[in-house]
Image (tube, rainbow, N blue to C red):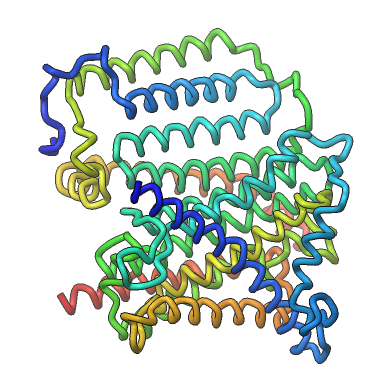
Amino acid sequence: MSPALHLAATGHGFLSPTGVEIAFLLVGIATLGAAVLTVTTKQLVHAALWLVVALGGIAVEYLLLTAEFIAWVQVLIYVGSVVVLLLFGLMLTKAPIGPSPDADSGNRPAALAVAVAAAGLLVWVVVDAFRTTWIELDKGVQGSTAASGESLFRHWVLPFEALSVLLLAALVGAIVLSRKTAEPRDAQSGKEKR
Amino acid sequence: MNDVLDVALRLLALLLAFLVLPLLVGQTEHKVMAHMQGRLGPMYAGGFHGWAQLVADGVKFAQKEDVVPNGADRRIFQLAPAVALLPYLLVLVAIPVGPAEGAVGQVVDAGIFFVLAVMGVGVLGSLMAGWASANKFSLLGGLRTAAQLMAYELPMLLTAASVAMAAGTVSLPGILEAFEWWWVPWQIVGGVVFFTAGLAELQRPPFDAPIADSEIIFGAYTEYTGLRFALFLLAEYAGIVILCGLTTVLFLGGWHGPFADGLGWLWTLLKTAVLAFVVIWLRVSYPRLREDQLQRFAWTCLIPLSLAQIALTGVVKVVIS
């Protein structure tokens, strides 16, 4: 791990929080609220817009942890591209203004179980991995572009490459799937020509 | 106390620039377009060559009734202009004007990413407006906006990455520190691609299919009146200023030029102004691209060009190091 993250849990209590910690907590609560609204609102486009708030909140959390580069990439990829894609899809399906009651599929208990299990797993992994690791926020930026790039391409190259192969596979799969529906039509038009 | 004063002064300067520069571009557009089309343009407001035309327009917009259509999604409809405008104000913070320490609103470590990320958020405003208006022309405009953004965001990012590779940093002042004159011919293809993709992201002619007034009235902004409509227009002109400023900083060397120590800020402004003139010139001289032409141009022309630029940058970088 980077030298900046040093174990110094003794001397940092939870009873005298600093301003940054309070801000972190408040933004976290707002993010959680937005996330809950995302899955409970009856209006499809509102769900997408609440997702923007949730993803933006996570970016702010990264900023508060001085991971500036990750924060901007979060905004660029998720708010700028993924949500735009989502909205594009919603507009294509002509999402109505006002609630859409048929959007509930009845899988609510199963979805809730999966969500709770996933959240539990993630919280457990993060807590177990970092335990009492402490970041000194006063000592300047520690998640700068240089630091992130160095750890990504020096220590974590293999996972990075594996992820890019996975993404490439997904891309190829998407192309294959979209071509499959197009082929019969081509065959038909070919027959008509003959 | 001094810090507070410093921050307040910077914010004030930024706000002034944000309010004045787009109006200047707008007035220039009136006059340049008029002269290119063999007419005079606004001549009465303010007396001298109609300099106060946009101020008069502003007063007009402020007096108009603020109408929200009956079937619209009220809150999102009203929020959309702010979402479209504010990101450009934020981006202005990171653009360095001169070589001095204090000539940038705030030094952002990952400047390129900050600028492109926040600019991408502005498009959400158009999408919100397009959907919330409950109007089929608005919806079509929103759809076209989204499709256009997805096609043109990629070449913009790739060419910006090429400059970052050349400079070895992603901070905007850092890029200018590392700049040498021969970067201009070296990165020229990237610069053209960046500028073109930026025009498309701003939905300026010839890439204005999302607001094509002869096809879909005014796209996502069809239902807007009064001040909210003016905010969308202001966002467009602020976008021109930001795009030209960014192209200047990334590809044309920003404040570099003769007497850069004293007159660096003037060079930045001059280069930005020339690029803004080109933006207006393109509006007058090119017909609007059709929707399929738009997509084909992005995917088969701009993206291969930007990939080639990245390859060239990498090769030259390895050779000279």
What residue occupies the far front of the structure in this picture?
Answer: B1
What x and y, as percent, mark residue B65?
A: 88, 47
Report how many numbered discs are placed on residues in the image. Answer: 0
Please report the residue visible at 20 percent of the width from the left and 31 percent of the height from the top.
Answer: A135
B70 sits left or right of A42 in the view = right
Residue at 77% over, 84% down: B48
Residue B310: horizontal and vertical position, in percent?
A: 35, 69
Is residue A105 visible in the rendered image? The answer is: yes
Q: Nearer the viewer, residue B276 or B282?
A: B276
* Quarter of the figure with residue B111: bottom left
Q: Which image quadrant: the C terminus of chain B?
A: bottom left
Q: Quadrant of residue A43?
A: top right
Task: Tell me if residue B295 can be seen.
Answer: no
Above or below, B31 relative to B149: below
Q: Does B146 sit above or below residue B211?
A: above
The answer to whether residue B54 is left or right of residue A9 is: right
- Taking depth in this image into account, of A134 and A138 the one nearest to the observer is A138
